Image (spheres, rainbow, N blue to C red):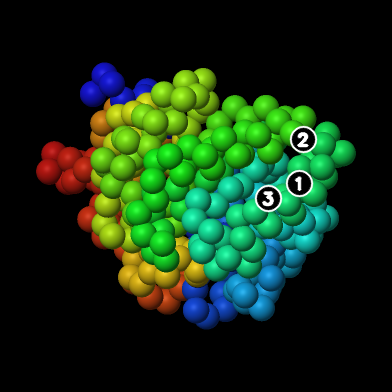
Amino acid sequence: MSDLPKRVTINEEGPREGFQSEKKMIPVADKVRLIEALADTGLKHIACVSYVNPKRVPTMADAEEVAAKINLKPGVQYSALWLNQQGLERALRGPLHVDGGVRVTASDTFSRKNIGKSVADAMVEQRLSLKTFKDRGMPVEWGTILGAFGCNYEGELSTDLILQRVQRALDEAELAGFTLKGIKLTDAMGWATPASVERLIGAVRSKWPDLEISLHLHDTRGTGAAAAYAGLRMGVTKFDASVAGLGGCPFAATDGAAGNICTEDFAFMCEEMGVETGLDIERLIDVAKLAEEIVGRPLPGHLMRGGTLNAARRKVAA
């Protein structure tokens, strides 16, 4: 396995992307309880809330209250998501970390469904956000391509289109006085496969060899772990994941297990291949069970039911 990275960074998306897709309201105390439990597993970045329109995403109407009640642990970055200038201003008023970045949606239809604006209109508004970052002295180092692997509304998306979207992110950042160091490729609609991950990362690297690449993969069609493994083989070291497989985008037009790749399952796979994660997987299993208890329904994570191989090895040796 010498072609795999020695270590990866896993960013936790469960409290944000997970709870935003739940059909019932989750009590503030339970959201905070899950976030604080995750902070004790070795995770260094936890996405906690989304500052979005509560009429469109009612389960995030309590974002300010949740953010205010988290007992912040030193050394852990607790972040907030925003999608427009109004959301950014709300986020900046709160206690959580706000990432400066550039987002470009691959599909125009998904952009309209997800944020209510065309790609072109969203970019015009995003210039206000970039100006805000510049005025506040905040760094902008990463661009994000939303829905980079395919669209449930428009179908297959060409590699050329995605490269155009990457170029757009780089250009918008440069126009605002920033230089991006990396691009996050996301797959809210569950189109990523090992072949498409290899193809798209290869194409991005061929054109911009110095850009770092991060992956945000969903397991909608059961290919999440395989796609993540392909990313590892391509040298990707930054991944988003969600405890117990919580989550999904409410506007991705998919049913079933639409959550991110499962944090503890992916961390287990990495560790078994000799790729360090810095995470306490046994604790993550406990938090996955807590997440399932909080939402009150079965979640798609496997490790919380099957257990780790280390636990199996200890049992056999006893």
Q: Is residue 84 above or below residue 1?
A: below
Q: Are marks 3 and 1 in contact (CB under 8 Å)?
A: yes
Q: Secondary structure at mark 3?
A: helix
Amino acid on which disc 2 is placed? Ala
The location of residue 202, given as percent across then percent down, is 36, 29
Residue annotated with mark 3: 123
Residue plotted at (62% across, 75% down):
56
Amino acid on which disc 1 is placed? Arg
Residue furthest out toward the right: 135
**Viewed as shown, does residue 85 lie left or right of 268?**
right
Q: Are marks 2 and 1 in contact (CB under 8 Å)?
A: yes
Q: Are marks 3 and 2 in contact (CB under 8 Å)?
A: no
Q: Nearer the viewer, residue 101 or 293?
A: 101
**Viewed as shown, does residue 20 lie left or right of 85?**
left
Residue plotted at (36% across, 72% down):
255
The location of residue 267, given as percent across then percent down, is 36, 41
Residue plotted at (60% across, 39% down):
168
Q: Secondary structure at mark 1?
A: helix
Numbered circle sitting on residue 127: 1
Locate residue 85: give its quadrant: bottom right
Amino acid on which disc 3 is placed? Met
The location of residue 94, given as percent across then percent down, is 79, 55
The location of residue 230, given as percent across then percent down, is 29, 36
Q: Is residue 205 above or below residue 107?
A: above
Quadrant housing the C terminus? top left
Residue annotated with mark 2: 176
> How many angstroms separate mark 3 from mark 1 (CA)?
6 Å
Q: Is residue 296 above or below residue 197?
A: below
